[in-house]
Image (cartoon, helix red, strand yellow):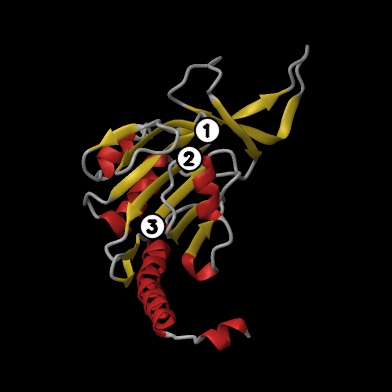
Amino acid sequence: ANVGQMFYYGPVPWHGEGAELKQPADMEEAIEAGGLDWEVEAVGLATDEKPPSPVRTRLAIVRKDRPRGHPGRVLGVAHKEFNPLQNREGIRIFDSVFGKGKRVYHTGGYLGSGEVIWLLAELPKNIFVTPGDRVNTYALFTNSHNGAIAVDFRLTTVRVVCQNTLCLALKGSNTRDVFKHSHQGDYRELEKKVAAFFAETLRAVEEVESRFKAMMERKFDDDLIKA
């Protein structure tokens, strides 16, 4: 599972961890329940020897809310150009485009010591293939503070509750369903780009539903199936 802290609305995750909510969370509730109200910063590195040698090409990414010497303070090592996206800013962008202050967040939190964070929101439109056959669709925001995962916004049908399900949600999606941004430069234009992406994504949900229904209406006789 590798869950550091998380919340969930709905069925209890298989690992039994996390804070249960009786209704979906809004942005502030998601940040609090998911343990995401902290920032990171980059600090210099040196070898553990006497005298120490500076590591000029890499920086340590650390949690600012944890004191020096804390075993969970260092989240990763990144290149000099690595520009962290703070939790609150990333979530604010996600919420301004999708949540807009509403209670839409079903799961969220961080893995390990905070190396990777995520927030999962249910889309306003689910897919109904046939009576009794409903496919839940979600918008997923993922970010890493160790450089393992780019800033990632995407459409998914996976309910993320752990490291395994997050890997499944991030695996092999069509580029049309995914928006990524590297941890470089600034993020001033990120909100506009994510807004345009989600506008297209919601249209894609409708197309997928129509394709599923077309598949349901296609009939095959026994001879064709045997062939």
Mark 2 or 3 closer to N-term?
Answer: 3
Given contact means CB atoms under 8 Å apart, are the residues at marks 1 and 2 in contact?
A: yes
**Residue pointed to by mark 2:** 162
Which quadrant holds residue 100? bottom left
In the picture, which quadrant includes the C terminus?
A: bottom right
Measured from the top left, where is residue 189 in percent x and y? 43, 60
Q: Residue at x 40, y 31 (%)?
A: 16
The amino acid marked with disc number 1 is Asn
The amino acid marked with disc number 3 is Ala
Depth check, mark 2 against mark 3: the one in front is 2
Q: Residue at x 58, y 61 (%)?
A: 172
Measured from the top left, where is residue 97 in percent x and y? 32, 59
Spatial CA span between label 2 and label 3: 16 Å
Mark seen at residue 2: 1
**Residue pointed to by mark 3:** 139
Mark 1 or 3 closer to N-term?
Answer: 1
The amino acid marked with disc number 2 is Cys
Mark 1 or 2 closer to N-term?
Answer: 1
Mark 3, residues whose alpha carbon is within 10 Å: few (<14), some, or many (≥20)? Answer: many
Toward the viewer: 188 or 105?
105
Q: Considering the numbered disc 1 on the image, is that residue within a helix, a strand or a loop?
A: loop
Q: Residue at x 33, y 64 (%)?
A: 134
